[in-house]
Amino acid sequence: EVQLQASGGGLVQAGGTLRLSCAASGFTFDDYAIGWSRQVPGKEREGVACFSTYDGATYYSDSAKGRFTISKDTAQNTVYLQMNSLKPEDTSIYYCAAGLHEIRLRLGFPEYWGQGTLVTVSS
């Protein structure tokens, strides 16, 4: 059973930083695309960042480029999202996401996702 346990969300002021963590289990870590999606209640989920299954290259959404950095610790089956220069529009529930199809992570509808962690950025 695929399990994705996200943590690290919280309340931060605009311009601040947060680091999200995701502990993954139930699948071979390097065989899946893994990353982060986010969703504001009532809106569509969007892909934020992910690692490719093919070459380990990273993808970032336009809103994440230059501010967010995805990283992973394969030995610990953990993926991180370092978020810098946070903006109020980054306020959302952030989900750790995984699947065999990277494109689904990029488009915001991954095959698997965890329970989410809330990030609130105050202005």
Image: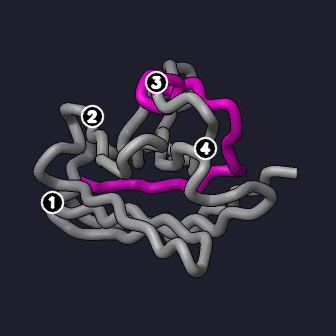
Q: Nearer the viewer, mark 2 or mark 3?
A: 3
Q: CA distance from mark 3 to mark 1?
A: 27 Å
**Dot 2 or dot 4, earlier in sequence:** 2
Q: Which residue is mark 1?
A: 85
The residue segment tinted magenta is: 103-123
Residue at x 67%, y 63% (from the top left corner)? 24
Q: Secondary structure at mark 4?
A: strand
- Specify the label residue 61 is tagged with: 2
**Dot 3 or dot 1, earlier in sequence:** 1
Amino acid type of the residue tagged 4 in the rendering? Ala
The coloring applied to the image is one colour
**Dot 2 or dot 1, earlier in sequence:** 2
Q: CA distance from mark 2 to mark 4?
A: 16 Å
Residue 27, horizontal then vertical, whole percent = 75, 55
**Dot 2 or dot 3, earlier in sequence:** 2
- Specify the label residue 13 is tagged with: none
Q: CA distance from mark 3 to mark 4?
A: 11 Å
